[in-house]
Amino acid sequence: MSIRKSLIISLLEKYSSLVINIISTVILARLLTPTEIGVFSIGAAFVAIAHSIRDFGITNYIIQEKEISRAKAKASLFVATLIAWPIGISLFIFSPFIADYYNDTSITNIFRVMASCFFFLPFSSISQAFLKRNLNFKTLYVINVSNTIVQSGTAIVLAYYNFGYMSLAWAVFASAIVNFLLCYAFKDKLVSYIPSYKNIASILHFGGISTIAGILSEIGTNAPEIILGKSLGFSSVGLYSRANGVATMFDKLVVGAVSNITTPVFANKIRSGEDLKQPYLFSISYLIVIAWPFLFFMILNN
C-alpha cells in the first residue's frame, strides 16, 4: 500500500473515531456528572502509564525487524504476556491502596475491571503489530473503528441504566474483548497465540530502551490528572480532562494519524534499501503547513 493511501485510511480512522467520540461525549455529558467522569479519569490515567510498560516496545520491534518469523512472533507474545499479566494482577491487587490515597473506594472497582483487559491485550497487540508491519491499514481501520463503536455504545447504554462511572470502565472492557476477537479473526499466518521463550534476548534489549521513553511520556501526559485528583477533587479532573481533549485535538487527529503510519512505512522502505531523506522531509513539510494554521486558529478562538 502506498504512503498516500495509508495516510488517507489512517486519517479516515481518526476522523471516524472522532465523530463517534463527539457524539458519545455529548450524550455521556448529559448522563454522567463531572465527578463521575473525574473518578474514571483518575483510573484511566494510572492505567495509561501501565500500558506504556505493558507494550514494552514489542509493537515497534515487530514493525522494524528486518526478518520476522513465526518463532520471533511466539517470542514476542511470550514477552508481551510476561509483562502484561503481572501488571494486570498488580493493578487488581493494589487498587485498594490507590483508592485509599484518593479517599474514594469507587476507584478500586474501576481499576479491577480495567486490569482484566491486560489478559487479552498481548494477543491483540501482536496481531495489530503484524498488520502495521504489512501496511494493512484497511483491516486496522475495521478493527479500531469497531472498537470505538463498541466502547461508545456500551458506555452510553450502561450510563443510561445508571451504572455511573462504572459504565466507562465496563465499556473499556467490552472494547478489549471485541478487539481480541477481531484481531484473532484477522491475524497474520505468522502469528501464533502459543508463546515461546526462545529468541527473546533481542526483544528484551529493544523493549527496555523503548519502555523507558514510553513511561516518561505517559507520566508527563497523565501527571496533571493524577495530581488534580488529589489536590482539587474529581470534579476538577473531569473538567480538565474535557478541556485537555480539545487542546490536544490536533495531536490526536493529525499527528497521531501521521505517526501511525510513519514507523511501518519507513521500516518497509529501509528493508527495501530506499533512502529516507526525501520521504522524511516531505512528511515534515506537509505537517507544518497543516499544523500552523490549525494551532493559530485554536489560539485565537480560546
Image (tube, rainbow, N blue to C red):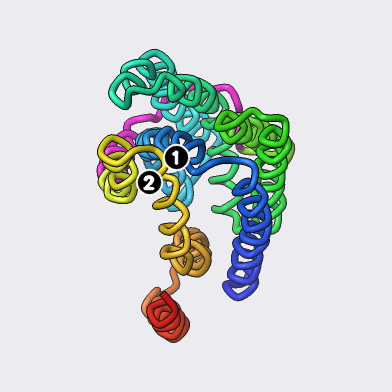
Which image quadrant is residue 210 in?
top left
Please name whichever residue, 37 or 18, is drawn nearer the observer in this view of the structure.
37
**188 w.r.t. 217: above or below:** above
Disc ID at residue 227: none
Q: Position of residue 258 (x, y in %)?
A: 49, 67
**159 w.r.t. 198: above or below:** below
Q: Residue at x 39, y 74 (%)?
A: 276
The residue that disc 1 covers is 38
Note whether residue 165 is visible.
Answer: yes
Note whether residue 288 is visible.
Answer: no
Of the numbered discs 1 and 2, the one sitting upstream in the chain is 1
Whole-Å distance between the Cαs marked 1 and 2?
7 Å
Residue furthest out toward the top: 93
Q: Position of residue 242 (x, y in %)?
A: 47, 54
Which residues make up the magenta segment?
A: 191-213
| In-image side of 245 versus 220 (left or right) | right
Tag 1–tag 2 contact (CB < 8 Å): yes
Which image quadrant is residue 155 in?
top right
The residue that disc 2 covers is 236
| Residue type indicated by callout 2 | Ser
